[in-house]
């Protein structure tokens, strides 16, 4: 009898686990109430990056004089922009459906919950209830934007992240609450699209968990664009007053704008899973996992945002694959490895882009760890000058004794692509010598990595 595997939640983790387990011979059923591919992925990540790309095209055209072209002034067509986002997400959702169908995964449109250790209750869209027996279960229901008690989003002027792809109108003046990864991406996005933007920064610089040099570079870009930064301020209320949105901060400062957007994190979707029926433990709404992504109940796995690990689609996808391998007993295979969360690369799609992986300079110094830090600006590279975009730098962190690459940060054009080279080094414990002796294409931005390694 085939292994019965039920996946609750069809995001990156769920799709990867379902397809990989099916290839390994499992009988797979996936339950999803919304979009195959994941709400966080296809309603947050992909549309935001598509809008950022549109803003980038707009910015490029506005500064095309530097490329020897006559400057043009394009205008945003919000209808076409909305159609563009729908087309992209629709294409990706269909691709996921086709992939699952090709592997004979049974897709149930509805919601799932545990009613016993090996029993899942699926409520279909028409209200029909099915009870499904499972040998293994994966919980991968994702997360949703966090909304505090002091704010009531209306989807028109007071927005959560999911109201903004695109918003009902391009804001004349947008106040962004939250200066983490999501917040700064929205600042970049809407300032590129022509909005006046104010950013509420609760700490003393944006991106408090990132390298301060990286944060400074981004702040300077924001200031150059006319973004107003309110540092050391925490929002305590957001409300509509006539045709304005008023944001009040705990230090007495008040910001009036046409729109406000909340970007203060997310909360896991665990409240409707009936986890207690199977004895699954929860911490702050998350389902904690071990190195195999197992919950405290060994045959019930957790992945993606719900697991409390890095909230990245790349991490969720890898978790799904590893769960399928572990469930089907291939963990002794030479190709199977535990996920190393500390070596996961991440990126922020601002302009300039920001990306990092592994040990940061600040982290190493705080631990008293001896590291070698090499920083090379993109302005020294021919390709950066060809692109008329010399902003940013590459910072490489290595072990001074062995030369092993421990981490790195990149600020600049295509940083999200370039960081993968450093990630490969970190993951496989390659040295700066390995990197420096690799022949890269000339002229390219990647040559900056070679200079940093030498």
Image (cartoon, rainbow, N blue to C red):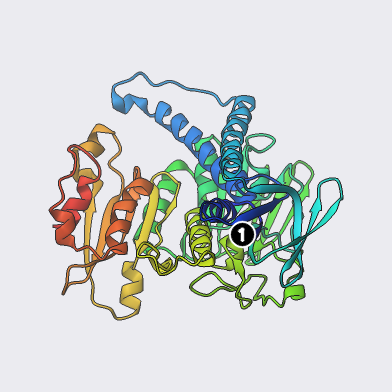
| Label 1 Cα neighbours within 10 Å, binned few <14 / some 14-19 / many ≥20 | few
Residue toward you, 71 or 214 = 214
Q: Is residue 318 left or right of residue 217?
A: right
Kindly identify the residue that appears in the image at 62 percent across and 33 percent down.
86
Q: On the image, which quarter does residue 330 sit in?
A: bottom left
* Label tally: 1
**398 w.r.t. 38: above or below:** below
Residue toward you, 321 or 272 = 321
User: Picture coordinates of residue 337 (x, y %)?
Assistant: 39, 66
Residue ID for mark 1 = 2
Q: Residue furthest right?
A: 127
User: Picture coordinates of residue 131 (x, y %)?
Assistant: 80, 60
Q: Residue furthest top?
A: 70
Q: Is residue 230 left or right of residue 153?
A: left
Q: On the image, which quarter does residue 269 sit in?
A: bottom right
User: Picture coordinates of residue 224 (x, y %)?
Assistant: 41, 44
Quarter of the picture holding the C terminus: bottom left
Q: Residue furthest front?
A: 1
**194 w.r.t. 242: above or below:** above
Q: Does residue 375 appear in the picture of this structure?
A: yes
**188 w.r.t. 376: above or below:** above
Residue toward you, 349 or 242 = 349
SS class, disc 1:
loop
Q: Does residue 257 appear in the picture of this structure?
A: no
Kindly identify the residue that appears in the image at 15 percent across and 55 percent down.
436
Kindly identify the residue that appears in the image at 64 percent across and 42 percent down.
164
Quarter of the picture holding the N terminus: bottom right
User: Picture coordinates of residue 313 (x, y %)?
Assistant: 51, 53
């Amino acid at each position: 009898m085939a292994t019965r595997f039920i996946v609750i939640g069809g995001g990156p983790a769920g799709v990867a686990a379902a397809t990989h387990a099916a290839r390994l011979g499992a009988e797979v059923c996936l339950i999803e109430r919304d979009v195959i591919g994941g709400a966080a992925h296809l309603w947050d990540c992909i549309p935001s990056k598509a809008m950022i790309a549109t803003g980038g095209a707009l910015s490029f055209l506005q500064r095309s004089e530097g490329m020897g072209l006559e400057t043009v002034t394009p205008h945003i067509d919000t209808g076409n922009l909305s159609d563009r986002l729908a087309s992209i997400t629709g294409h990706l959702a269909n691709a996921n459906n086709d992939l699952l169908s090709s592997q004979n995964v049974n897709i149930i449109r509805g919601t799932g919950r545990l009613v016993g250790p090996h029993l899942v209750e699926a409520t279909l869209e028409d209200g029909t209830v099915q009870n499904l027996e499972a040998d293994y279960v994966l919980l991968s229901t994702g997360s949703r934007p966090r909304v505090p008690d002091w704010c009531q989003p209306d989807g028109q002027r007071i927005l959560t992240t999911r109201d903004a792809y695109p918003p009902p109108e391009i804001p004349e003046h947008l106040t962004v609450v939250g200066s983490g990864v999501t917040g700064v991406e929205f600042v970049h996005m809407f300032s590129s699209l022509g909005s006046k933007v104010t950013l509420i920064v609760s700490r003393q610089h944006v991106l408090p968990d990132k390298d301060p040099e990286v944060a400074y570079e981004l702040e300077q870009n924001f200031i150059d664009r006319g973004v107003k930064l309110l540092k050391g301020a925490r929002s305590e209320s957001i409300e509509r007053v006539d045709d304005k949105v008023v944001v009040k901060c705990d230090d007495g400062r008040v910001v009036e704008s046409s729109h406000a957007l909340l970007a203060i994190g997310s909360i896991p979707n665990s409240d409707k899973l009936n986890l207690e029926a199977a004895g699954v433990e929860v911490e702050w709404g998350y389902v904690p996992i071990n190195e195999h992504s197992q919950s405290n109940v060994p045959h019930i796995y957790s992945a993606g945002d719900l697991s409390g690990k890095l909230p990245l689609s790349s991490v969720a996808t890898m978790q799904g694959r590893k769960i399928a391998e572990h469930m089907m007993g291939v963990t002794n295979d030479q190709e199977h490895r535990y996920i190393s969360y500390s070596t996961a690369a991440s990126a922020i799609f601002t302009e300039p882009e920001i990306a990092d992986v592994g040990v940061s300079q600040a982290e190493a110094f705080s631990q008293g760890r001896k590291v070698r830090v090499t920083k090379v600006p993109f302005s020294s590279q021919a390709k950066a000058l060809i692109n008329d975009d010399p902003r940013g730098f590459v910072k490489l962190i290595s072990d001074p004794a062995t030369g092993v690459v421990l981490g790195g940060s990149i600020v600049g054009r295509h940083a999200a692509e370039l960081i993968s080279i450093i990630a490969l080094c970190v993951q496989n414990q390659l040295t700066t010598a390995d990197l420096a002796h690799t022949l890269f294409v000339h002229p390219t931005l990647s040559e900056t990595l070679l200079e940093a390694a030498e």
